[in-house]
Image (spheres, rainbow, N blue to C red):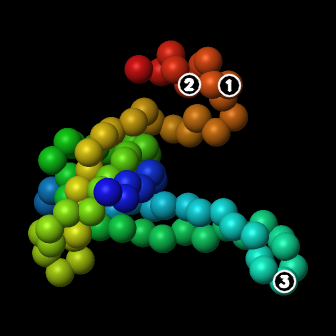
Amino acid sequence: MKSLFGKVVSTKGTNTAVVEVERIFRHRLYEKKMRRTKKYHVHDEVGVSVGNSVTFVPTRPFSKTKHWKIVNKGTTGSTKGMKRKEQGNLS
């Protein structure tokens, strides 16, 4: 089962969160690192807030645009610059 990891950018809908997923890839010809983002409408039973990091998986369609469900809520903010030892102490 494919799971994605992203950051919550909106929680205005009822039981719905908008999660932004960022991917980094290399351009085929120019070999420059490029960054692309995509937003997913996700079913929220966990109760996340804006800025939370979440993991979500595909599921049956909840509506026209919601085909994903949150399975794990992470911490607020980014862990990008942290060492692996410090990331383990967040929970």
Q: Which residue is mark 2?
A: 87
Q: Earlier in the sequence, mark 3 or mark 1?
A: 3
Label 1 sits on a secondary structure element that is loop
Instruction: Judge left or right: residue 25 versus residue 18.
Output: right
Instruction: Judge left or right: residue 43 versus residue 7.
Output: left
Q: In the picture, which quadrant includes the C terminus?
A: top left
Using the numbered discs, state the Cα–Cα distance from disc 2 to disc 1 in whole angstroms: 6 Å
Q: Residue pushed farthest front?
A: 1
Q: Type of residue at label 1? A: Lys
State whether residue 31 appears in this view. Answer: yes
- Residue 88 image position (x, y, % from top left): 52, 20
Label 3 sits on a secondary structure element that is loop
* Residue name at image x 83 percent, y 71 percent: 32
Q: Which residue is mark 1?
A: 83
Pair 3/1: label in front = 3
Category of crowding for the residue at label 3, using alpha-carbon neighbours closer than 10 angstroms: few (below 14), some (14–19), many (at least 20): few
Instruction: Judge left or right: residue 82 versus residue 26.
Output: left
Q: Which residue is mark 3?
A: 29
